[in-house]
Amino acid sequence: MSKFRRLRSPWWVMSACSAAILWSLWPWIRPALFPAAGRPWLVVLDGYHRLDHALMLQGQEPFRSWPILLITCPVTGQPTALQAAQASPPLSVLLERPPLGGDTAGQAVALAKWLHQLPLQSRPGRVLLLSDQHHFPRAAWAAQLSAGGLGTVVQPWAVDAEDPRLSLDRWAWPQLGPALRDALRLQAWRISGSTLSELDSKKRQKKAQACWIPQPFPFASA
């Protein structure tokens, strides 16, 4: 009997492991149990053809009149005046600024901060995340980890999914490795408020320089 007791894990170890698992999965559990009450949004990463695709969806059912949030860097020059004029309702633009740089984890954090500033009743229960195939599942996992704790479900939408030349195996290591890396970075952000980008200062500086132009941007709203 004493040997059996020694092999059993203390109750607090099992409780701690259960709590850690629950905490890790909370961004997926919270929207299922307590979804946000606001209407859905189209969220576009970087713009260009992705923003054009969102504008096309905005004129179709069931996406008609869904608001669009564009998360981009000033250097992209997005949206163009024509794109801004086509959006209905008006396009919201969230400009990334250093130290977020221009990487996927920084975009996910920018999304979370934008959601935090919305009134509770306006936080979307669902966002359609528009990017390219090569950006998934990484972008979707990062965005869900950042937004799920606020009750928002992130649904990936590959704008180039119908292009046979660009077919990818999302579970191949070249896709899965970066996805796991950014998922760990977002879990670290949930704990510490940092995506750990400071651990690679050269890459961080390069991303920030590539993203930022120190001059006014005409369509900035955040």
Image (tube, rainbow, N blue to C red):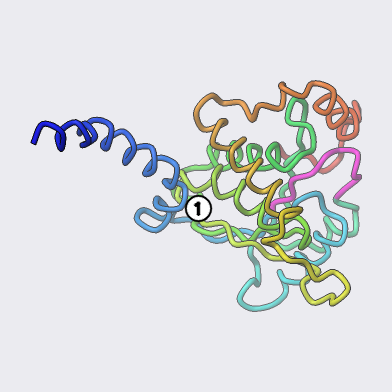
Residue sitting at 39 percent across and 43 percent down?
21
Residue sitting at 80 percent across and 71 percent down?
167
Vertical comparison of 154 with 5: above or below: below
Q: Is residue 166 magenta?
A: no
Vertical comparison of 16 with 76: above or below: above
Q: Position of residue 84 (x, y in %)?
A: 83, 55
List the single residue furthest toward the left.
1
Q: Which quadrant is home to the N terminus?
A: top left
Residue sitting at 87 percent across and 56 percent down?
48
- Give, as a single range, the part of the protein colored magenta: 69-78
Vertical comparison of 8 with 28: above or below: above
**In terms of depth relative to the viewer, which is nearer, 217 or 159?**
159
Q: Which residue is mark 1?
A: 152
Q: Position of residue 124 (x, y in %)?
A: 52, 54
**In terms of depth relative to the viewer, which is nearer, 105 or 125?**
105
As drawn, is 175 to the left or to the right of 47? left
Q: Which quadrant is home to the C terminus?
A: top right
As drawn, is 18 to the left or to the right of 177? left
Within-10-Å neighbours for mark 1: few <14, some 14–19, many 20+: many
Question: Of the residues shown, which amino acid type is indicated by label 1?
Answer: Thr
